[in-house]
Amino acid sequence: MAENPVLEAILIAAKVLGVRKEDVVTKDIIVSEKEKSIIKELVEKRANGYPLHYILGEKEFMGLSFFVEEGVFIPRPETEELVEMALDLIKRYGLRVVADVGTGSGAIGVSIAKFSGAIVFATDISEKAVEVSLKNAKRHGVLDRFVVKRGRFLEPFEKDYEKMEMILSNPPYVKMSARLPQDVLFEPSEALFAGEDGLDFYREFFRRYSTEGKIVLMEIGEDQVEELKKIVPGAAFLKDTSGRYRFLHINRRSS
Ligand code: SAM
Ligand code: GLN
């Protein structure tokens, strides 16, 4: 639920009135009855658990503003750590071709294209995600280096698989039986849930694709390391800044 309800109400008002959030509290703004009732309705919607960022229509990620809307996963701050690690590796090895599996709003792929100059092949099973990620690629000026197609895993880019030097993903990894906070339940279920134990995506991905010669970095749930060691022998696990194991890492490059 809302951690800071007053701030959220101000953000909603600023969005409806088309002003900066500072202006809501510091300036005298004439608010019409119509605007008042829209603000009231949206604040009530939020109070009932509807995600703030769907109301605002955007979410900041890696210092960039990403369009989000119902049907698309709202990027999370922990995923910024995955992008930072990926950018370091891209620089260190001079990588040119990167994949983003399950791109959602394009948070990972568009940030990588923007900050590294690499070409990104992105996929998603959701048509809405393809549409929104393209809007974000355009917004951040990387349309020429962000190629997105609808499909499962890397199926749309099978013929380019050899070329891919790095594979990134924040896949669905939540257990079917998990109880999630109310606002998360407004997000698409195919973005969150991955079978009974939350591991279906990893199981199928690593059964289908060879990692030979590639670097792989994927977000994982903090309690999934032991099971993932069995599914992906040889993978390493990296901690986030709060000390939890949140990333799976494979580096099979020879140089
Ligand atoms: N990468 C984005 C981010 O970090 O904000 C979105 C992550 S969201 C947790 C997972 C995304 O993977 C969703 O957009 C979902 O539609 C997509 N997805 C789920 N299963 C997939 C599959 N087998 N192949 C491709 N995309 C998939
Ligand atoms: N950490 C996400 C949450 O807030 C789950 C994301 C995922 O499955 N990739 O619920």
Image (tube, helix red, strand yellow):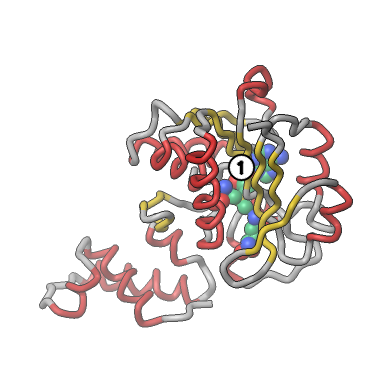
Question: Is 207 located above or below residue 7 in the figure?
Answer: above
The percent position of residue 21, horizontal first and vertical second, equals 24, 70
| Mark 1 nearby-residue class (10 Å; few <14, some 14–19, many ≥20) | many
Residue at 71%, 61% in the rendered image: 221
**So how many labels did they put on this image?**
1
What residue type is disc 1 on? Leu
Position of the N terminus, as image quadrant, is bottom right
Give the residue at mark 1.
Answer: 168
Image point 71% across, 36% down: which residue?
252
Q: Position of residue 47 (x, y in %)?
A: 48, 77
| Residue 131 is at least partly visible in this image | yes
Residue 217, placed above or below residue 118: below
Residue 242, by quadrant, is: bottom right
Residue extending furthest front? Answer: 255
Residue 30, image quadrant: bottom left
SS type, badge 1: strand
